[in-house]
Amino acid sequence: MSLINRLDARSADFDAALTHLLAYDASQDERIESTVRDILRDVQSRGDAAVLDYTARFDQVQASRLADLEIPLAECRAALAALPADQRAALESAAERVRRYHERQRAETWTYTEPDGTMLGQQITPLDSVGLYVPGGKAAYPSSVLMNAIPAKVAGVPQLIMVTPTPGGTHNPMVLAAAALGGVDRIFAIGGAQAVGALAYGTQTLPAVDKIVGPGNAYVAAAKRRVFGTVGIDMIAGPSEILILADGSTPADWLAIDLFSQAEHDELAQAILLCPDAAYLDAVYAAIERLLPSQPRADILRVSLANRGALIQTSSLEQACELVNRIAPEHLEISTRNPQALLPLIRHAGAIFLGAYSSESLGDYCAGPNHVLPTARTARFSSPLGVYDFQKRSSLIQVSAAGAQVLGRIAATLATGEGLHAHAASAAARLDTSSQPA
């Protein structure tokens, strides 16, 4: 079996082959859904007691009170202070870059006044509280703590509550250090669907939040899907994706490794390379063949690349751009001599990396833009996580007496046409200038 699929965009069966390659079964596991439904109902009903029971069952952590599972912020500060110097410097540098980038996203309240004195505008306010889910156990993602916590704090969210499972009671020091840098306000050592339920519904100890963000396993994703509407959520993420558009000018080894960088996430991750140069695609294939055996996650890479990866020859770079928009990838690398020339042709991508030196992995950790990105073609209508996800917009309408004479007639006419006579009367009442507010 080939290490990675080879497709030709000029062939008659290409559309069918690409559709098959992109197909991802996102159907929900009924067993997981049933389990999550029961856990959420239990947490909603019993609060702290249910969370403690599930934490003991799934994480082997015993506690008599949920308050005993709250991690003091002093422990986070101590974890930061105890990090090796290189790790602390890297984490602090990443945090500063993420903060600086997201500060540019912060929206401000604005108004304008019409000639008759009517004022219209938009008021920007932060969410009151946000819950941040952080995977625990074998997986530790301090970078995700920064990417979720910092935009929330830049937006002005006053209460950020982090939950993270700690199987066996082990706290990951880099996650705690990232929480200190990100400005997290409270941390609870709980995880799974029960933690999502606690954040959504609140318990006797843990207050309900307005929105839940952060990655998790299938149970966490199912729980977030179920509580949406009671609270907001960031997104339901699918497997990670990278799409590379190349002209053959980048060393083949670089792009082989870039394909590995996303394919190593799991067997369902997708890594695709588009290029009009067949000889270059051959060179990348040879690099994959040569470099793959030395990769620590080679077993995962083999499955991901063989099942969902592809090297695709296109007729031109312009056709490659058309395919980018069809695929709407999470990550897009434009690894060409003049990437800026192709940028206007790109409409759908979560994050766009321009030029040979802009590897996707830099965006994952420290470039500055957020690494929480839309997957599974949702980049057609979704955006990266940002400050705007933690702010709300309220419309401002202050109508002057003169403005009411104009707007009242328009509104009364439209309301009458819709058969909403009280609406029409409300608008028309302001047309009588003989009666004025005291």
Image: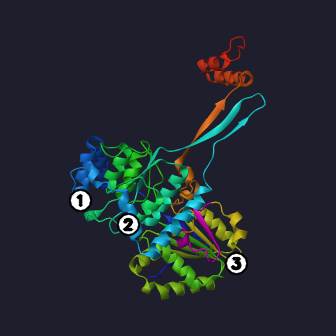
User: In the figure, 175 relative to 6: above or below?
Assistant: above
In the rendered structure, the answer to whether residue 136 lies left or right of residue 96 reads left
Say whether disc 3 or disc 1 marks the residue closer to the N-terminus.
1
Query: Which residue, given by chain and number where applicable, does mark 1 sit on?
Result: 61
Q: Do the residues labelled 3 and 1 touch (CB within 8 Å)?
A: no
Residue span colored magenta: 348-363
Q: Which residue is drawn at 66% across and 82% down?
A: 249
Q: Quadrant of residue 163?
A: bottom left
Mark 3 packing: few (<14 Cα in 10 Å), some, or many (20+)? Answer: some
Distance between mark 1 and mark 2 Cα atoms: 21 Å
Which secondary structure, mark 1? loop
Say what amino acid the circle numbered 1 marks: Val
Q: Where is residue 25 in the image (x, y as percent from the top left)?
A: 43, 61
User: In the figure, 36 relative to 324: above or below?
Assistant: above
Query: Which residue, given by chain and number where applicable, does mark 3 sit on?
Result: 337
Say whether disc 1 or disc 2 marks the residue closer to the N-terminus.
1
- In reply to whether residue 142 is colored magenta, the answer given is no
Say what amino acid the circle numbered 3 marks: Arg
Query: Which residue, given by chain and number where applicable, does mark 2 sit on?
Result: 79
Q: Position of residue 309 (x, y in %)?
A: 50, 74
Which secondary structure, mark 2? helix
In the rendered structure, the answer to whether residue 344 lies left or right of residue 190 reads right
